[in-house]
Amino acid sequence: MAFEFIREELSEARYIRNHRDTVGKSAGNLVDGFFEHLLVLQQMRFENPAWAKKYAKDTLKFQSFTSVRTGATDLHNLTAIISNPSKFKDKVGSELSGYRFDELQFKRYLRDVAAGRYNPSYDRSMFLKLQKGLKIKNSLLKQARRVIGDYGSSVPNERKTVSTRIMNSFRQDNRFRSDLYKPYAKTVKNKDLLLDPKAKSKIPYGAKIAAAAVVGYGVGRSSLFN
């Protein structure tokens, strides 16, 4: 128990702990990471609300997103990077300055999550605005936004497909070190939100996920693609 605070500190912000962790990462990589973290938080509002509330509160702990902090959440630190492009120009280039990010809208969203308030139309609008403002091109993130941005209306197959693909994505670029990866991985496993990798088929696993996505997104969801 005497060293519990050490274990807690080591569990915090392991993907982006300081300014040096941005070295070698492109602006596109960083905004994709931010958007993916935010999508996970949105999904956890439904699947693990107690954790989501705490994570949102912790992300707002420093009140502003002016700097990367060792004791902050990974979402906080990713937000600090995209909110202050001039600070990171020498590390990731000038591309960050070309993105649009509404910090006030983002803070309102976090306060809603922390308070357990849910406004579907506001969330849909915010996620779409972020996708456009951050110039998200990753097809997985676009598809995930369509499902997770309106998660309350999604169907089981959509939830399994998007959870499986996000889990696979987090295993890349050291994002598995993120402070939300383990809670997310545990939650989607316990809630049976992953596609079965042992399903007998001659189709490669990656292709099965893509095929499932086509089926899932095609069932009663055409309006979300607009």
Image: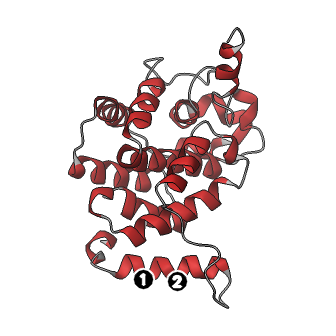
Q: Quadrant of the N terminus?
A: top right
Q: Residue at x 61, y 52 (%)?
A: 28
Q: Is residue 209 visible?
A: yes
Q: Position of residue 190 (x, y in %)?
A: 51, 53
- Residue wearing tag 1: 215
Above or below, 76 relative to 33: above
- Amino acid type for the residue under numbered disc 1: Val
Q: Residue at x 32, y 80 (%)?
A: 219
Depth check: 86 or 188 in front? 188
Q: In the image, is 79 to the left or to the right of 70?
A: left
How far apart are labels 1 and 2 at the CA level?
6 Å
Do residues under tags 1 and 2 come within 8 Å of each other at their CB atoms?
A: yes
Q: Is residue 137 visible?
A: no
Q: Secondary structure at mark 1?
A: helix
- Amino acid type for the residue under numbered disc 2: Ala
Above or below, 37 relative to 139: above
Q: In the image, is 150 to the left or to the right of 78?
A: left
> For residue 211, which numbered disc appears in the image?
2
Q: Position of residue 192 (x, y in %)?
A: 49, 61
